[in-house]
Image (cartoon, rainbow, N blue to C red):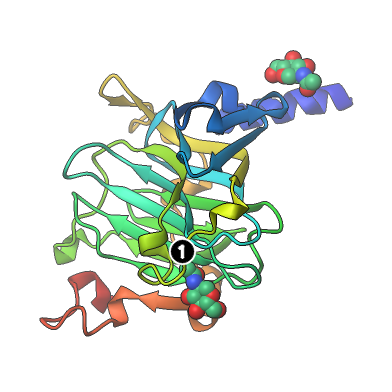
Amino acid sequence: MSRMLIVLVSYLLVGVGVSAMNFYNDVDLTWGGDKAKIMENGSLLVLILDKGSGSGFQSKAEYLFGRIDIKIKVVPGNSAGTVTAYYLSSQGSTHDEIDFEFLGNVSGEPYTLHTNVFSQGQGNREQQFCLWFDPRLDFHTYSVIWNPQAIIFYVDGTPIREFKNQEDKGVPYPKNQPMRLYSSLWDAEDWATRGGLVKTDWSQAPFTASYRAFAADACLFSNGKSSCTDDNRPSGRWWDQSLDSIGMKKLKWVKDNYMIYDYCQDSKRFPQGFPPECSY
Ligand SMILES: *[C@@H]1O[C@H](CO)[C@@H](O)[C@H](O)[C@H]1NC(C)=O
Ligand SMILES: *[C@@H]1O[C@H](CO)[C@@H](O)[C@H](O)[C@H]1NC(C)=O
């Protein structure tokens, strides 16, 4: 009986395209030589930053819409100046990009989670948050849902940001260029600490960020084609997910309590008026 259940459950999982992923099979270590390491039989990946260099990896697959989840434990302790970046990006000068960047801080002070959305090469859509937990202490799940209607950023299942498709207002929306997942750990002391106020303390090096449970329930893109077609729609709920009223309430809770910067409220930056998507 239990064996039948297991078979059934694995069948269902394969059906929606979520298989247990393994870092050996699903990512390439692309930067930093042996400073990027896969361990524990493919279930753990660590990135290291020292004075010599940072490190990084990228997904083998390219996606054109999907739901991407990964658990990250960011650099612990005095991590000021370090940035752990996790993003989806296409290639080229008119690329699309969906960014999570964790800006380290001195011990005891909160990390900043910096987010951005680029469409067709244009970004400048920063929102920043502090979190309701210390992301240094444990693994937490950071997710992106990207479908034709919206991009939603989640932290442990709580939506923190929604970027809606507003092409009807002339705002370009990422929908034609396949993206890969990228992640890197790098030194950004001149940028990440309020314009270089605090320098990276190299006596604390090496700095380490850790990753587990990468999952992509996504339309795979290869040889110029998407695995999702009109006849073969993804069955995952993410395909037509946008925030419902419960999601909107959670998003408001995050905005009211944890948002520390929103480009749509930075009037100094946009003296000629806010970008069109801000009026939503
Ligand atoms: C490692 O993974 C392989 C296949 O993914 C499996 O056959 C093997 O039993 C695993 N080993 C350990 C120690 O978990
Ligand atoms: C570090 O913590 C201080 C004090 O809470 C805060 O003002 C600053 O924005 C934080 N820096 C980063 C990069 O998050």
At which x and y percent is residue 203? Answer: 59, 54
In the image, residue 98 above or below residue 162: above
Residue nearest the viewer, comparing 182 with 68: 182
Q: Quadrant of residue 212?
A: top right
- Asked if residue 66 can be seen in this view, the reply is yes
The image quadrant of residue 15 is top right
The residue pinned by badge 1 equals 199
Pointer 1 residue Cβ closer than 8 Å to ligand 2: no
Identify the residue at image location x=67%, y=28%: 39
123 left or right, relative to 139? left
Which is more toward the observer, 171 or 244? 171
Residue 148: % across, % down: 32, 49
Which one is in front, 101 or 19?
101
Q: Is residue 89 left or right of residue 132?
A: left
Q: Amino acid at mark 1?
A: Lys
Query: What residue is shown at x 47% (from left), y 54% (from top)?
Result: 83
Q: Secondary structure at mark 1?
A: loop
Q: Position of residue 269 (x, y in %)?
A: 21, 78
